[in-house]
Image: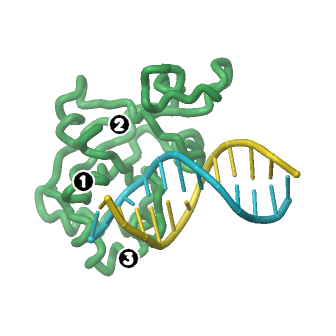
Chain colours: A green, B cyan, C yellow
Amino acid sequence: MAGHWLMKSEPAEASIDDLARAPAQTLGWTGVRNYQARNFMRDAMQPGDDVLFYHSSCAEPGIAGLARIAGRAAPDATQFDPASPYHDPRSPADKPRWLQIDVKLVRKTRLLSLREMRAAPALATMRVLQPGNRLSITPVSDAEWNAVLALLGPGA
DNA sequence: GCCAACGTTGGC
DNA sequence: GCCAACGTTGGC
């Protein structure tokens, strides 16, 4: 069975609508600058894995759509771009420190708000809901994935 | 290896 | 804008 993940994005930077408008409805997930999240991309994420696309740091945080991992982890070019806010001068060119992975839209859903997620007992175990969690990529269990789909409702 | 200082995240 | 939680840095 494919793995499941929740990936956070600030909609001001990359929203579910940006993903829908992207060529092949696919975006490279760049800008991850946390080792744990990078290691998920490098070691655990597989093409075909399911993704909950989560909007963070915005007026209505929550799950905004479903997506899928569309490739393998590869060096994130923004780390070598001095003009990028994600530039990392300490990353060796011959041994890139940061990775990205392609994410392809499955479909936009209704917004499953953070408030609604917190209110759902079936989602209480979700990593993203744990106090103090800041990871931008977190694993999602089969049960959590199914519970999210059930909450999204028919047609989701 | 410790740990204080600092920067970032992200909901509110 | 606030602030708590967390990760990273760097001096020692």
Q: Position of residue A27 (x, y in %)?
A: 32, 31
Residue sitting nearer the eye, C5 or A129: C5
Q: Amino acid at mark 3?
A: Ala
Tag shown at residue A58: 1
| N-term-proximal mark, 2 vs 1 | 1
Q: Nearer the viewer, mark 1 or mark 3?
A: 1
Secondary structure of the residue carrying numbered label 2: strand
Which residue, given by chain and number where applicable, does mark 2 sit on? A103
Pointer 2 and pointer 1 on the same chain: yes
Which residue, given by chain and number where applicable, does mark 3 sit on? A124
Quadrant assignment, res A38: top right
| N-term-proximal mark, 2 vs 3 | 2
Q: Position of residue A119 (x, y in %)?
A: 26, 78
> What is the distance, in whole Å, between disc 1 and disc 3 at their CAs?
22 Å
Quadrant assignment, res A125: bottom left
Secondary structure of the residue carrying numbered label 3: loop
| N-term-proximal mark, 1 vs 3 | 1
Q: Quadrant of the C terminus of chain A?
A: bottom left
Disc 1 residue crowd, few under 14, some 14–19, many 20+, Cα 10 Å: few
Q: Chain of mark 1?
A: A
The reply to whether dot 2 and dot 1 touch (C-beta < 8 Å) is: no
